[in-house]
C-alpha cells in the first residue's frame, strides 16, 4: 500500500470514529436529559398519559393522651399483603428464571402469613383466571411489622405489603365513652370526632413507572411523604378515671340502677379530671356494647336537677331580694295552697316551720323554696338559672352534648312558677351541674369547663386549647354565705354521716328528680333520676364531684348516690394529695327562727 493510500485509510477511520463518537455523545446527552434533567417532567407526563402509576401513602393518626401523658388511643402500623399476579406470571415465564420459583415462594409466603401454600397459590390462580392481566390480589390483611420484615427479606418484586394504620386503645374501656372510636365505615365518635382535625394525618403519594411485566422501573419513583397526625392531650387523669369507673359500676349494680356517672371538675381551672360512667364501651370492640352505651351519657343525658338547683334559687333571692341565710318564710309539709292556686308538698311530714333560707336548703323543703321564690320575679329567677348555665351547652361542646331545656318565662304556668324553684320544669346535664357548683365553689367566678389541654403536631409544635375566660356571675360576699349554707346541708342534712370524708370539710346537695313518660308527658310513678353534687375542702374548694344514678331500685331517693359520692370524693382527695381542712367549720346555721 502506498503512503498516500495509507493516509487516506487512517483519515477515514478517524472520521468514522469521530462520527460514532459524536452519535454516542448525542445519545448520552439525550439519555442524561431524559433520565436526570427532565426525569421528573417525563415521569409526570408518563403518568398523565396512563403509562405511570401512583399509590397513596398513609400517615399515622395521632395519639390521645391523658393529663400525665398516658396513652389512651394510638395508631399502630399493620400491613395488608398484596401480590401482583401478572408480574409473578411474567417472571415465571421469562427466559431467565427467578431465583425463587413461585412454587417455593408461595410456600414461604404462606408460612410467614399463617396460611397454607395451597391457599396462597389458589388465591393467585383465581385472580389470573378472572383476569389474566390482574395486578392485584390480597393474600392477608393486618400482618404485623415482624411479618412484614420477613416478607420483605424474600425480595420478591411482585409482592408488596401495603402499610395502614389501625386504632388501638391500650386501656380498653377506661374513658372509652369519652374517647369514642372509629367505626368500620370511618364514622367517628367522641374525642375521635371532636379532635379529628388535630388527629388526622395528611396522606402522601408515591408515583412510579412500571414495565410490561409489572416491575417498577428503577429511577422512576418519586415520593411525597405523609404527615402524621397530632397528639391530643386531655385533662383526664387515667388512674382516677379507672377507679371511678370500677366504683360506679359496682354502685349501679348494688342500687339496681340502669346507669350511673361520676364527673370530677377542678374548681380553679374548670378542667374535667374524670368522666366515668357505666355501662361503658371498649373502643377496641364497640360492637360488643349496646348502641345506647357507646356514646357518653354524661354529656348526652339531660334530666331535671331537682333539689341540687335549690341552691340557685337561693342565689337568686340573695341577689335580687337581698335575702340571707337568716331570712324567714313559714311553710308546712303538705297541701300548701298558693295564691295562684298551685299546690306544693314536701317529701316528708312536718308541722309549719318558720324556715330560714339555710334551713329550707338543709331540709330541702319544696314549700319553703317556693315561698322564697316569690320574693323575686320569674324573670329574675330565669336570668339566674341562665347565668349558672341552664339551657346552654358547656364550652366543651362534646359531640352529641345536650344543652338542656329552659322554657321562656311566658310559658311558665301557675304550677311551674313554683316548681322551677325546686329544680323542675327545666333540664340540665351532669357537666352543667358541675359547672354551676364550680362557680359557687370558686367564689362566684365561673370558669368554662374544658376537656382538651392541647394539640401537638408531628413536628412538635404545641397548640394549647383556647384559654377559658372566667366570668363573675355572683357576688363574692353573697357567694361565701351561700357556700356556708351548702356546707350546712352536708353537715346537718339526713345523709351527713354517709358522705363524710375524714379530714375534710365537705359541701354537698342531693337531687331526686321524677322522670317523665315520653308517651303521656306525665311523671312515671316511683321512677327517679337521682344525683348528688358537692365540693371539698369546703374551706378551700379544689374539686367538684357530681354523681348520678338513673332509676335506682334498691333505694329510690337521692340517698342512693351518697355512698358513691363519698367514695368518689375520698379518692379525688387522695389522687391529688389535697391538704386536709385546716380551719374549723363556723357555728351551725339555724334551720328555723
Image: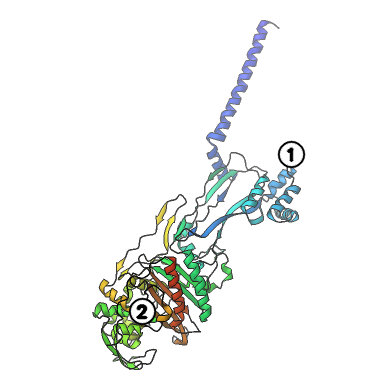
Identify the residue at image location x=34%, y=80%: 488
SS at circle 2: helix
Q: Residue 584 or 295: which is nearer the viewer?
A: 584
What numbered label is drawn on residue 96? 1
Q: Is residue 65 left or right of residue 287?
A: left
Q: Is residue 129 left or right of residue 477?
A: right
Residue 571 appears in view: yes
Point out residue 251 in the picture as x, y percentages from the top left corner: 50, 77
Q: Is residue 38 left or right of residue 158?
A: left
What numbered label is drawn on residue 593? none
Q: Quadrant of the C terminus?
A: bottom left
Q: Residue 340 or 12: which is nearer the viewer?
A: 340
Q: Residue 147 or 195: which is nearer the viewer?
A: 147
Identify the residue at image location x=64%, y=9%: 7
Identify the residue under disc 2. Answer: 309
Point out residue 558 in the picture as x, y percentages from the top left corner: 43, 82
SS at circle 1: loop
Q: Residue 515 or 581: which is nearer the viewer?
A: 581
Residue 301 appears in view: no
Q: Is residue 77 left or right of residue 338?
A: right
Residue closest to the far left: 322
Relative to 127, say whether 529 is above or below.
Answer: below
Relative to 17, say whether 360 is above or below.
Answer: below
Q: Quadrant of the N terminus?
A: top right
Amino acid at each position: 500500500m502506498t503512503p498516500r493510500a495509507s493516509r487516506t485509510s487512517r483519515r477515514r477511520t478517524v472520521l468514522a470514529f469521530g462520527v460514532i463518537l459524536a452519535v454516542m455523545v448525542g445519545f448520552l446527552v439525550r439519555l442524561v436529559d431524559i433520565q436526570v434533567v427532565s426525569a421528573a417532567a417525563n415521569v409526570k407526563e408518563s403518568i398523565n398519559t396512563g403509562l405511570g402509576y401512583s399509590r397513596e401513602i398513609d400517615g399515622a393518626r395521632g395519639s390521645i393522651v391523658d393529663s400525665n401523658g398516658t396513652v389512651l388511643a394510638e395508631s399502630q402500623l399493620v400491613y395488608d399483603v398484596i401480590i401482583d399476579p401478572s408480574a409473578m406470571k411474567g417472571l415465571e415465564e421469562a427466559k431467565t428464571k427467578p431465583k425463587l420459583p413461585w412454587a417455593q415462594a408461595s410456600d414461604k409466603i404462606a408460612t410467614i402469613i399463617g396460611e397454607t401454600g395451597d391457599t396462597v397459590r389458589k388465591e393467585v390462580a383465581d385472580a389470573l383466571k378472572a383476569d389474566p392481566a390482574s395486578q392485584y390480589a390480597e393474600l392477608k390483611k393486618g400482618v404485623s411489622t415482624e411479618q412484614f420484615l420477613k416478607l420483605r427479606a424474600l425480595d420478591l418484586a411482585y409482592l408488596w405489603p401495603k402499610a395502614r394504620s389501625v386504632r388501638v386503645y391500650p386501656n380498653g374501656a377506661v374513658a372509652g365513652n369519652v374517647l369514642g372510636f372509629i367505626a368500620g365505615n370511618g364514622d367517628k365518635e367522641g374525642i375521635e370526632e371532636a379532635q379529628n382535625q388535630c388527629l388526622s394525618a395528611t396522606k402522601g403519594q408515591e408515583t412510579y413507572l412500571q414495565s410490561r411485566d409489572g416491575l417498577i422501573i428503577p429511577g422512576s419513583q418519586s415520593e411525597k411523604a405523609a404527615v402524621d397526625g397530632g397528639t391530643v392531650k386531655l385533662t383526664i387523669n387515667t388512674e382516677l378515671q379507672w377507679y371511678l369507673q370500677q366504683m360506679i359500676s359496682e354502685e349501679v349494680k348494688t342500687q339496681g340502677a340502669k346507669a350511673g356517672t361520676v364527673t370530677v371538675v377542678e374548681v380553679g381551672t374548670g378542667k374535667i379530671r374524670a368522666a366515668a360512667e357505666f355501662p361503658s364501651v371498649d373502643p377496641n370492640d364497640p360492637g360488643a356494647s349496646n348502641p345506647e352505651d357507646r356514646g357518653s351519657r354524661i354529656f348526652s343525658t339531660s334530666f331535671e336537677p331537682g333539689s341540687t338547683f335549690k341552691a340557685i334559687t337561693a342565689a337568686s333571692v340573695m341577689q335580687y331580694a337581698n335575702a340571707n341565710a337568716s331570712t324567714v318564710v313559714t311553710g308546712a309539709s303538705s297541701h300548701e295552697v298558693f295564691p295562684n292556686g298551685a299546690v306544693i308538698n314536701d317529701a316528708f311530714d312536718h308541722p309549719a316551720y318558720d324556715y330560714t333560707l339555710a334551713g329550707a336548703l338543709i331540709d330541702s323543703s319544696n314549700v319553703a323554696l317556693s315561698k322564697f321564690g316569690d320574693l323575686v320575679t320569674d324573670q329574675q329567677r330565669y336570668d339566674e338559672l341562665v347565668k349558672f348555665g341552664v339551657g346552654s351547652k358547656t364550652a366543651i361542646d362534646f359531640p352529641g352534648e345536650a344543652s338542656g331545656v329552659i322554657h321562656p318565662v311566658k310559658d311558665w304556668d301557675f304550677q311551674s312558677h313554683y316548681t322551677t324553684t325546686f329544680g323542675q320544669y327545666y333540664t340540665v346535664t351532669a357537666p352543667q351541674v358541675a359547672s354551676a357548683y364550680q362557680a359557687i365553689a370558686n367564689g362566684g367566678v365561673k370558669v368554662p369547663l374544658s376537656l382538651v389541654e392541647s394539640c401537638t403536631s408531628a413536628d412538635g409544635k404545641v397548640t394549647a386549647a383556647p384559654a377559658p375566660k372566667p366570668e363573675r356571675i355572683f357576688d363574692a360576699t353573697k357567694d361565701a354565705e351561700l357556700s356556708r349554707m351548702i356546707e350546712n346541708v352536708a353537715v346537718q342534712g339526713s345523709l351527713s354521716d354517709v358522705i363524710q370524708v375524714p379530714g375534710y370539710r365537705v359541701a354537698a346537695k342531693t337531687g331526686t328528680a321524677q322522670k317523665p313518660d315520653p308517651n303521656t308527658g306525665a311523671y312515671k310513678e316511683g321512677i327517679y333520676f337521682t344525683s348528688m353534687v358537692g365540693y371539698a375542702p369546703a374551706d378551700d374548694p379544689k374539686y367538684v364531684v357530681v354523681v348520678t344514678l338513673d332509676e335506682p331500685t334498691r333505694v329510690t331517693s337521692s340517698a342512693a348516690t351518697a355512698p358513691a359520692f363519698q367514695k368518689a370524693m375520698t379518692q379525688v382527695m387522695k389522687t391529688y394529695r389535697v391538704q386536709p381542712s385546716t380551719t374549723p367549720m363556723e357555728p351551725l346555721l339555724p334551720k328555723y327562727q
